[in-house]
Image (cartoon, rainbow, N blue to C red):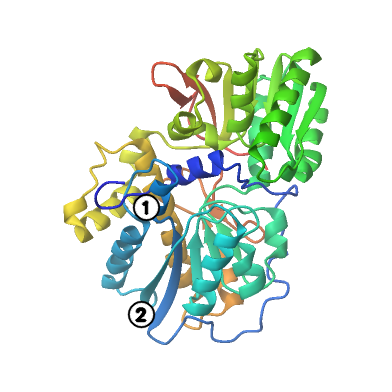
């Protein structure tokens, strides 16, 4: 990214979109089953009387460039170096100094994730890890290695239940709740009323579609005229494109005027372009659609975006981010540590600021939870501390909370439409409390 190696969360969203990686999950709501098999109270790995070791798995800028992914924002390692230095100057956490173990990581598949997890958990012996792992790969930490994990995204009821050795927290709203909140917001807007609806989803979302989406639509009396699931075709992009083209033909012949997509965003949109057909209305619940970089990198044209409405976890606007005092502090701490690579919030893009905010929110969550866990830090105590935080104020998070059985922070949803002048999705109103 800049000469000082910048990388942002939106850059990772691009990578997820173009590699067809899923960050989806499977069951209807978060449960309180996390930790049923956690270890008995004992001094936690990575914690001494004077230190606590935090692992961070972040994108390597050179690796991103090598695969042609545009990115912006400070390097992840530099951000955490700055924030940890500032926190340690304030006394650390309960008198313990934070030690950083950074692992360069590109989220392109299970093998890369497994390698990064093992490097942090076993080789570095961290107490907790922050990362951008996708799908079920964070379970290496929470189901296998017994390391608390804070993801920027990826929490779900299914992964929560499988995290039997350590808690799995996330900044972004849980995957399954995203679907529920998004579909409910679309229903509340009246966008499905009186429509002939085609329902599209991908194989990894079979369970959440069955358990969450379909019951919501049925209860609301929505007329679903056709269901068009995309089967699991692995990494065979040609086969995926062929299947998507067939799905578009099926949508076209079904008489549907509205397509509801509750899975990944880019693949179906590109299929609409290839087949030169668009329904009257496209509704989606994927945050991928909110990133201009995703649209540009995947080649989706503005005309294809025109009928799109997205209901997804709320993404603050540039003005909201610049006014966010929590984010201002995060940027100030970074600028103090790296004065030659300063970030000017007024000049930075919304995506750059959003990327910084997501990472800083994860770090602040680690600090608050570890501080609340007290002097004798154990896995059970740390989980209880997280659940006891209640309502949270974190950078870039307009509404957030943790509680027993609720291990993802985000609580806000937004509805977005495409603005041709801005060439991006823009909110139709302020953040709203999410359903469920």
Residues tagged 2 and 1 counted as in contact (Cβ below 8 A): no
Pick the front one: 277 or 150: 277
Which mark is first along the chain, 1 or 2? 1
Q: Secondary structure at mark 2?
A: loop
User: For the residue carrying disc 2, how many other residues have a C-alpha within 10 Å: few (<14), some (14-19), or many (20+)?
Assistant: some
Give me the disc on residue 298.
Answer: none
15 over 310 or under it: above or below: below
Q: Position of residue 166 (x, y in %)?
A: 62, 71
Q: CA distance from mark 2 to mark 1?
A: 34 Å
Q: Quadrant of residue 91?
A: bottom left
Decide if residue 328 is in sight here.
yes
Q: Quadrant of residue 347?
A: top left
Residue highlighted by disc 2: 95
- Please tell me which residue is depicted at 66% across the width and 37% down the height of the picture: 263
Outermost residue toward the left in this view: 340
Q: Position of residue 423 (x, y in %)?
A: 42, 21
Quadrant, the C terminus: top right
Tell whether 371 sits left or right of 326: right
Tell whether 345 sits left or right of 180: left
Q: Quadrant of residue 219?
A: top right
150 over 235 or under it: above or below: below
- Please tell me which residue is depicted at 34% across the width and 43% down the height of the picture: 72
Tell whether 94 sits left or right of 284: left
């Amino acid at each position: 990214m800049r000469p000082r190696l910048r990388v942002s969360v939106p850059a990772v969203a691009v990578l997820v979109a173009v590699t067809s990686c899923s960050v989806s999950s499977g069951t209807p709501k978060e449960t309180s089953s996390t930790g049923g098999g956690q270890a008995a109270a004992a001094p936690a790995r990575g914690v001494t009387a004077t230190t606590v070791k935090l692992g961070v798995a972040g994108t390597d800028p050179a690796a991103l460039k090598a695969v042609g992914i545009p990115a912006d924002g400070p390097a992840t390692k530099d951000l955490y170096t700055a924030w940890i230095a500032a926190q340690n100057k304030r006394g650390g956490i309960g008198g313990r100094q934070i030690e950083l173990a950074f692992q360069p990581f590109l989220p392109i598949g299970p093998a890369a994730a497994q390698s990064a997890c093992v490097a942090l958990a076993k080789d570095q012996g961290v107490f907790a890890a922050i990362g951008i792992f996708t799908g079920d790969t964070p379970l290496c930490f929470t189901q296998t290695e017994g390391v608390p994990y804070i993801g920027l995204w990826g929490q779900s009821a299914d992964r929560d239940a499988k995290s039997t050795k350590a808690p799995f927290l996330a900044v972004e709203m849980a995957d399954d709740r995203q679907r529920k909140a998004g579909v409910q917001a679309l229903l509340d807007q009246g966008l499905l009323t009186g429509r002939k609806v085609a329902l599209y989803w991908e194989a990894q979302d079979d369970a959440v579609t069955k358990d969450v989406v379909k019951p919501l639509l049925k209860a609301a009396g929505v007329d679903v005229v056709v269901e068009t699931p995309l089967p699991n075709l692995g990494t065979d992009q040609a086969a995926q494109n062929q299947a998507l083209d067939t799905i578009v033909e099926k949508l076209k012949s079904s008489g549907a005027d509205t397509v509801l997509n509750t899975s990944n965003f880019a693949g179906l949109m590109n299929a609409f372009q290839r087949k030169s057909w668009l329904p009257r209305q496209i509704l989606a619940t994927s945050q991928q659609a909110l990133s201009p970089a995703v649209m540009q990198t995947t080649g989706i044209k503005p005309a294809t975006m025109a009928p799109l409405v997205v209901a997804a976890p709320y993404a603050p606007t540039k003005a909201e981010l610049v006014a966010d005092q929590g984010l201002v502090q995060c940027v100030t701490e970074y600028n103090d540590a790296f004065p030659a690579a300063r970030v000017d919030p007024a000049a930075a893009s919304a995506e750059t600021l959003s990327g910084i905010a997501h990472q800083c929110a994860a770090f602040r969550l680690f600090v608050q939870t570890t501080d609340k866990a007290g002097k004798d830090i154990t896995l059970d105590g740390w989980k209880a501390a997280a659940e006891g935080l209640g309502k949270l104020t974190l950078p870039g998070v307009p509404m957030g909370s943790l509680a027993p059985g609720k291990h993802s922070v985000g609580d806000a949803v937004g509805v977005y439409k495409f603005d041709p002048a801005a060439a991006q999705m823009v909110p139709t109103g302020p953040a709203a409390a999410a359903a469920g």
